[in-house]
Image: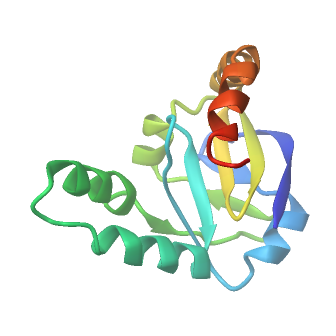
């Protein structure tokens, strides 16, 4: 499982360091793609395959299904580490997530998320200020 929040810098070539404890868990391969809320998802191969199977099983006749499949699948790319534990984030994905110099790499249990630091701080503020309402909605789901 992936847990924690780490600040890193994106270099001029679009490479980002991934924490060593995360790299160990995706040594068998991983995929980077557009995530939700304008971040990037990095999923271990097994998690990616499970998600991709669910996506391709959605009805092709539904525009929302097609849109979600395009969002998640069209920009997906294999993750490859260099000798310093960095990955190259493709330019279209950097643009999608508005990545600048400072980024945040977060562990979200079964995936890694990569955020622009400023966007992450805004997202956290919004979420933290609405935490009571979120908790109440989730309680209806038994959480």
Q: Does residue 101 appear anywhere in the picture?
A: no
Q: Does residue 110 appear anywhere in the picture?
A: yes
Residue 7, image x, y percentages: 83, 37
Residue 137, image x, y percentages: 62, 32
Q: In this view of the protein, which residue sits in the foreground, 115 or 108?
A: 108
Residue 135, image x, y percentages: 72, 31
Q: In this view of the protein, which residue sits in the foreground, 61 or 99?
A: 61
Q: Where, by quadrant of the figure, is residue 55 drawn?
A: bottom left
- Up-down relation of residue 88 to residue 46 (above or below): above
Q: Quadrant of the N terminus?
A: bottom right
Residue at 60% x, 82% y is 46
Residue at 31% x, 52% y is 68
Q: In the displayed structure, does residue 134 sit left or right of residue 25?
A: left
Q: In the displayed structure, does residue 78 sit left or right of residue 122?
A: left
Q: In the displayed structure, does residue 99 sit left or right of residue 109?
A: left
- Up-down relation of residue 97 to residue 4 (above or below): above
Residue at 69% x, 17% y is 130
Residue at 67% x, 21% y is 133
- Up-down relation of residue 143 to residue 118 (above or below): below
Q: How many marks?
A: 0
Furthest-left residue in view?
Answer: 61
Q: Where, by quadrant of the figure, is residue 29 drawn?
A: bottom right
Q: In this view of the protein, which residue sits in the foreground, 133 or 95?
A: 133
């Amino acid at each position: 499982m992936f847990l924690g929040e780490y600040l890193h810098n994106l270099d001029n070539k679009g490479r980002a360091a991934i924490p060593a404890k995360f790299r160990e868990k995706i040594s068998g391969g991983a995929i980077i793609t557009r995530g939700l809320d304008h971040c990037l998802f990095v999923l271990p191969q097994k998690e990616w395959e499970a998600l991709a199977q669910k996506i391709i099983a959605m009805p092709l006749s539904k525009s929302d299904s097609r849109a979600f499949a395009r969002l998640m699948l069209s920009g997906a790319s294999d993750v490859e580490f260099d000798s310093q534990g960095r990955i190259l984030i493709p330019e279209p994905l950097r643009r999608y997530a508005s990545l600048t110099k400072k980024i945040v790499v977060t562990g979200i249990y079964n995936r890694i998320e990569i955020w622009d630091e400023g966007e992450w701080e805004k997202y956290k503020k919004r979420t933290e200020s609405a935490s009571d309402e979120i908790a109440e909605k989730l309680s209806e789901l038994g959480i």
